[in-house]
Image (spheres, coloured by chain):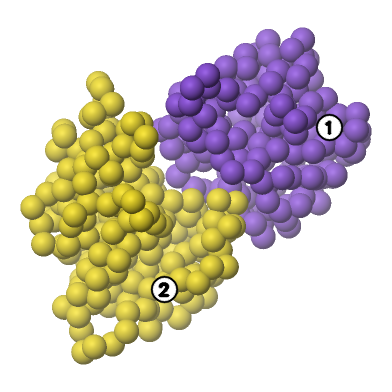
Chain colours: A purple, B yellow
Amino acid sequence: MRKIGVVYSGNDVHYKTFHEPKFNQYIHKLIYLPEFQNTSLDELDVLVVPSQLHKQLLLEAAPKIHAFANEGKIVVALGPQPWNWLPNQKWEERPTNFWWWLEKNAKSGLIANLPEHEFFNYIPLENATWHQHGVFWPPEGCEKIITAEDGGAFLYIDRISTKGTWIITTLDPDYHFGSYFMPATERFLEGFFPYLAIGNI
Amino acid sequence: MNKKLTILKLDPMHAFGESSRHSEKTWKEIDQYDLDQQDLSNIDVLVISNFVDQEYLLKQKNIIENFLADQKIVVFCGHLFRMWLPGVSPFIPERVQTFSDYEVFTTNNDSGIFDGVTTGDMTYNKGVAGFFARGYHPVSHDVEVLLRFKSGHPVTYIDRSSSAGTILVHAGRDLLGYSSNHKTTGRIPDQLYTWLEREVQTHA
């Protein structure tokens, strides 16, 4: 089982999400963001960087996160990322489709682009389905697991930009579970932590 | 007596705040982590909303307490889980059997903050309930409740007894952030501002 570290902002939704016992048991180390620079990541195999972190502290943490990845380890980034810190980041903010499911012939806009991917053994597409805040345009050669119809990525794996593995998604289950919203986000995390711990990544 | 209201808001510097971060506002904003460096002597109201780092606020508890001891106002919107705000108990999610249990009702109070704001507009967005609040901070002391769930649990209250100042506690999103031309919730920021002016006057 991989040892997972999670960066913790100190905000109310992260407190709730990462202290929830069923998720917390998968977290080897919760790293308070203001103490990130002084915290050893040596024993960790996976580092989860959630959404809605403090801009300056996140950007200051970025070189250490990249160094962690370059040891051949796994970095996960959740949610909208308006600031450049991911490898070869091309983020496109889009109007949030809060209400897609109320429309006639509702389409979430999510496509399982690699339906045979290991990811879906843990998280069926319906458990990754709520609204989106935008898409990424990953470099050529990345695994685009969940995409929009036009090919923009909601969730992809980048094994080529660094020596490590980056699982990057625009989805923000950490926020929604922690704000008592959107039951799909709880099911997403119920699959996602086991995927990170024991999945074939 | 008629001095201008000075509001200071702590900015968690998170991604959702990015689009409005540089727009014109009627309040001053600082990076949340600059609170311990900030001169608060000319500030009347401190607004602290969800996404703020409560671990940090707990370390700055004395600053908040001293601010309130000066008979000033703290507005907190969010789910409290660290005891940095006098008299406030930790957030509890509302237990719901049906979506209508998330309905929020205005009490008979004279704050004016929620005047003309309907239960429907507060509770529902396109038929989906629970946007305004999904829980509460339990109270046993002398507070003025402004909004309640059907269960009676207080969504929003004013506490003038836990400190020399005034604390407005709202178990939801930033009340200054509501803007709508077609929903009555759009009235909240202006009415809150008016209440703050009046509350500051009573301490002047």
Residue B120 x, y percent position in the rendering: 24, 40
Q: Residue at x 66, y 36 (%)?
A: A170
Q: In the image shown, does B47 or B130 lie closer to the viewer?
A: B130
Q: Is residue A190 visible?
A: no
Q: Residues within 10 Å of mark 1 (few under 14, many from 20)?
A: many
Q: Which residue is mark 2?
A: B26
Looking at the rendering, in which quadrant would you find the C terminus of chain A? top right
Q: Which amino acid type corresponds to the residue marked 1 in the rendered image?
A: Asp
Question: In the image shown, does B55 or B107 lie closer to the viewer?
Answer: B107
What is the count of numbered marks?
Answer: 2
**Relative vertical location of residue A82 with respect to residue B120 in this rendering, above or below:** below
What is the chain identity of the residue bearing mark 2?
B
> How far across and down, in percent of the image, does residue B129 sit?
32, 33
Residue A75 relative to residue B2: left or right: right
Q: Horizontally, is B184 left or right of B40 in the view?
A: left
Look at 21% across and 42% down and name the residue there: B119
Residue pictured at 32% horizontal, 79% vertical: B5
Question: How far across and how far down the image is residue B67, in percent?
Answer: 33, 73
**Cα separation between marks 2 and 1:** 43 Å
Relative height, residue A123 to residue B65 (above, below) = above
Horizontal side of residue B116 vs A134, given as left or right: left
Residue most extreme to the left: B108
- For the point 19% across and 54% down, the residue is B116
Please identify the quarter of the rendering in which residue A3 is found: top right
Q: Amino acid at mark 2?
A: Thr
Query: Measured along the vertical axis of the image, is residue A13 above or below residue B13?
Result: above
- From the viewer's side, name the closer residue of B36 and B122: B122
Give the chain of mark 1. A
Residue matched to label 1 = A158
Mark 2, other Cα within 10 Å: few <14 / some 14–19 / many ≥20: few
> Which of the 4 image quadrants contains residue A159?
top right
